[in-house]
Image: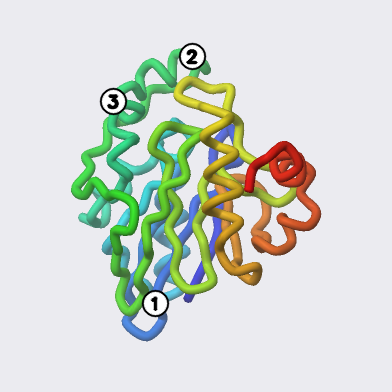
Amino acid sequence: MIVRRLVVGPFSENSYVVGDSASGEGALVDPGGQVPELLALAQREKLRIGKILITHAHWDHVFGVAEAKRLTGAETVLPAGERSMLEHLAEQSEAFGLPVPEQPEIDRWVAEGDIVDVGGLSFRVLLVPGHSPGHGAYVSGLDALSGDTLMAGSVGRTDLPGGNYDIFVNSITRKILKLPAATRVHPGHGPSTTVGEEAETNPFVLEMLATGGR
């Protein structure tokens, strides 16, 4: 699987180009801005963008979705539990003093266990709420696009509107950490890592485990 990252926006959010080299089919994941650069990256990898996968509807992860859809005609995919968050993009923007993004149209609302195909790749939807109410990850083989859940040496925040720490602990310890240790985690911020590395060294994860998250 091709995985290429572009860091965009005021919060240094990771936007990804992923794809299947055999078929030439690709997807954008959480296009938070700089869409022409993302599409140029896809072109260099000889990928046709047919899907836009969104982990959650926080401002920094969806700012470029409407533009990306307009330029590619790609199908937009978002977990159904993020509908309300998406509908309140204007309020999110005002809270941070940021420009209001164009409201993106979602073509497919997904649930736990749904499969999204990108060429010969199949991404399984894993719902991991807590950072936001309906947050999802997309897992294909030993690659997980985790959004703002597990990160290298850190985890996502739960103090924003819609966050819930107790639910988040369950998502991290009973879902993300249950993936194979060799699973490569491609997060919403910071470098990629593995489930095994974070289970052994991430201080936030270790605290979650120590306080009863199993």
Q: Quadrant of residue 61?
A: top left
Per the image, label 2 sits on a secondary structure element best described as helix
Cβ atoms under marks 1 and 3 closer than 8 Å: no
Residue at 72% across, 37% down: 211
Q: Which residue is mark 3?
A: 87
Which one is closest to the eye, mark 3 or mark 2?
3
Q: Quadrant of residue 33?
A: top left
Q: Mark 3 belongs to which amino acid?
A: Glu
CA gap between label 1 and label 2 equals 38 Å
Disc 2 crowd rating (10 Å Cα; few below 14, some 14-19, many 20+) is: few
Residue at 29% across, 58% down: 114
Residue at 65% across, 59% down: 192
Q: Mark 2 belongs to which amino acid?
A: Ala
Q: Nearer the viewer, residue 159 or 192?
A: 159
- Residue 13 against residue 121 in the figure, above or below: above
Q: Is tag 3's residue or tag 2's residue first in the polypeptide sequence?
A: 3
- Residue 66 against residue 48 in the figure, above or below: above
Q: Nearer the viewer, residue 134 or 97?
A: 134
CA gap between label 3 and label 2 equals 15 Å
Per the image, label 1 sits on a secondary structure element best described as strand
Residue 100: mark in rendering: none
Per the image, label 3 sits on a secondary structure element best described as helix
Q: Which residue is mark 1?
A: 20
Q: Which residue is mark 2?
A: 95
Q: Is residue 213 left or right of residue 53?
A: right
Q: Nearer the viewer, residue 156 or 25?
A: 156
Residue at 27% across, 63% down: 50
Q: Mark 1 belongs to which amino acid?
A: Asp
Residue 106 % position (x, y): 23, 43
Residue 2 % position (x, y): 49, 73
Residue 59 % position (x, y): 44, 31
